[in-house]
């Protein structure tokens, strides 16, 4: 019988778990509401400062501005500690800055 979890499948399983953790919606409510239907069927963007922080951090990481991303993600996590994706991104930014001690503390 062949083992299901091997060294080659582990990264894919880890990413799937991160995806599932961020996609999970507790108590039937959305973690990050972003839009709703307008009166004529058009989508309207709902202002949410937490979404703005997460988007800012994502852009900073894409541009390799890791200290700025860390600052935005720390603010996000202070407000919403149960959002796994923010913790993952914070750990990623710390690792990119070669701060493994901080990355392990996430």
Image (cartoon, rainbow, N blue to C red):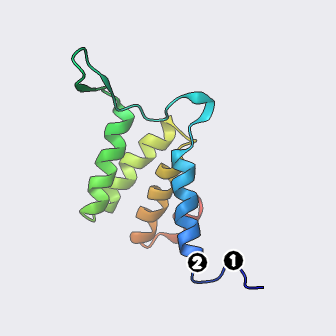
Residue at x 58% of width, y 68% of height: 13
Q: Is residue 37 left or right of residue 100?
A: left
Residue 86: x %, y % from top left: 47, 50
Determine which residue is flagged by label 1.
Answer: 4
Q: Quadrant of the C terminus?
A: bottom right
Q: Secondary structure at mark 1?
A: loop
- Taking the view exactly as shown, the residue that stands out farthest to the top is 39
Please name the residue that numbered disc 2 is placed on: 9
Q: CA distance from mark 1 to mark 2?
A: 8 Å
Q: Which residue is depicted at the point 41% across and 48% down?
A: 73
**Disc 1 + disc 2, Cβ < 8 Å:** yes
Residue at the spot 43% in from the left edge and 73% down from the top edge: 98
Residue occupying image coordinates x 52% and y 64%: 15
Relative placement, left or right, of 10 versus 64 is: right
Q: Secondary structure at mark 2?
A: loop
Quarter of the image with the N terminus is bottom right
How many badges with numbers are in the image? 2
N-terminal label among 1 and 2 = 1
Q: Is residue 67 left or right of residue 88?
A: left
Task: Find residue 63 and report its image quarter.
Answer: bottom left
């Amino acid at each position: 019988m062949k083992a299901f979890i091997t060294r080659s499948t582990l990264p894919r399983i880890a990413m799937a778990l991160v995806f599932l953790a961020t996609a999970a919606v507790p108590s039937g409510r959305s973690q990050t509401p972003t839009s709703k239907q307008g009166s004529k069927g058009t989508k309207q963007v709902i202002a949410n400062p937490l979404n703005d922080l997460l988007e800012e951090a994502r852009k900073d990481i894409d541009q390799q501005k890791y200290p700025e991303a860390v600052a935005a993600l720390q603010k996000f996590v202070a407000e919403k500690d149960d959002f796994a994706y923010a913790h993952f991104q914070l750990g990623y930014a710390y690792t990119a800055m070669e701060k493994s001690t901080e990355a392990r503390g996430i």
